[in-house]
Image: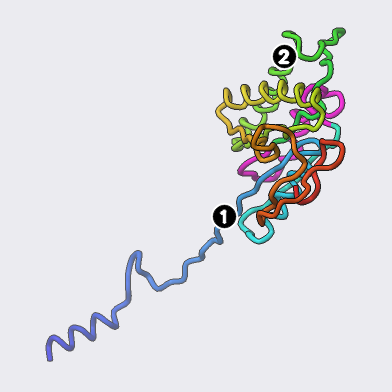
Amino acid sequence: ASTLAHAQAVETAPIMGSQSTEEVAVQPVDDTYRILVIGDALGGGLGAGLSRMAEPEPRFEIVNRFQETSGIARPEVYDWPASLPKIMEGKEFDAVVVLLGAHDRQAIREGDFRLVFNTPEWKAAYEARIDELLDVLNAAGLKVFWVAIPPMGDAKYEADMKIVAALQKQEVLSKGQVYVDLRSAFLTPDGEYTDKGPDETGEVRKLRSRDGIAFFKQG
């Protein structure tokens, strides 16, 4: 009887301390992973594709910001390092995806001088401008996924883009960020350009437009 009385007293006693029965307001956890996509016309297409892929998974939010004719060599056309702080203002991004460079095989203006593409002076200036962009993104604490320029149908254009891509890869890796090379997905097994390839279902389809630059939606 004594044991039963003691058990009843324990059951009816108020719970104290960390086990209090008082209601505690629980703050909702925002686990959304926000990705900013920036680039030229190709970058805009990449952003659109990522948005479609993220639709079934609400945890991912894609924000696509592109300027079709922009690049790194000509900030007078569009200055990404200067524009990014305003784009990111008031928003908390976790990562940024970058695809730029298709318009960069041209002279760089340095004061009164025009630096000719692929000269040592041009390469040094181009590397500095890549670093400027990466410094802005690093200062914002973002994980950077820099996507390689895809293969181009015209042989001379492709050769120039390989030069640009190599400089981008060098600087991205030197800044401790991720360089995503998807080029092999748009080449034949022999390393030649092709406008066809498997879509997300594995069916071989035409992925690139006739100009050898742009992508169709499935691409």
Q: Position of residue 17 (x, y in %)?
A: 33, 65
CA neighbours of label 1 inside 10 A, class few (<14), some (14 to 19), many (20+): few
Residue 44 image-quadrant placement: top right
**Left or right relative to 93: residue 211:** right
In this picture, residue 7 sits left or right of residue 202:
left
Inspect the image, locate mark 1, and give the three-letter code of the amino acid beneath it: Asp
- Foreground residue, 60 or 2? 60
Amino acid type assigned to the residue bearing label 2 in the image: Lys
Disc number at residue 31?
A: 1
Span colored in magenta: 70-97
Residue 42 x/y as whole percent: 78, 38
Q: Secondary structure at mark 1?
A: loop
Residue drawn 69% across the image and 59% down it:
55
Q: Is residue 75 found inside the magenta-colored segment of the image?
A: yes
- Of badges 2 and 1, nearer the viewer stands 2
Q: Tag 2's secondary structure?
A: helix
Name the residue carrying label 2: 123
Q: Position of residue 2 (x, y in %)?
A: 12, 88
Report, in whole angstroms, how far the alpha carbon at label 2 lies from the one at label 1. Answer: 41 Å
Using residue 27 as the reference point, say whether residue 76 is left or right of it.
right
Badge 2 local density, few (<14 within 10 Å), some, or many (20+)? some
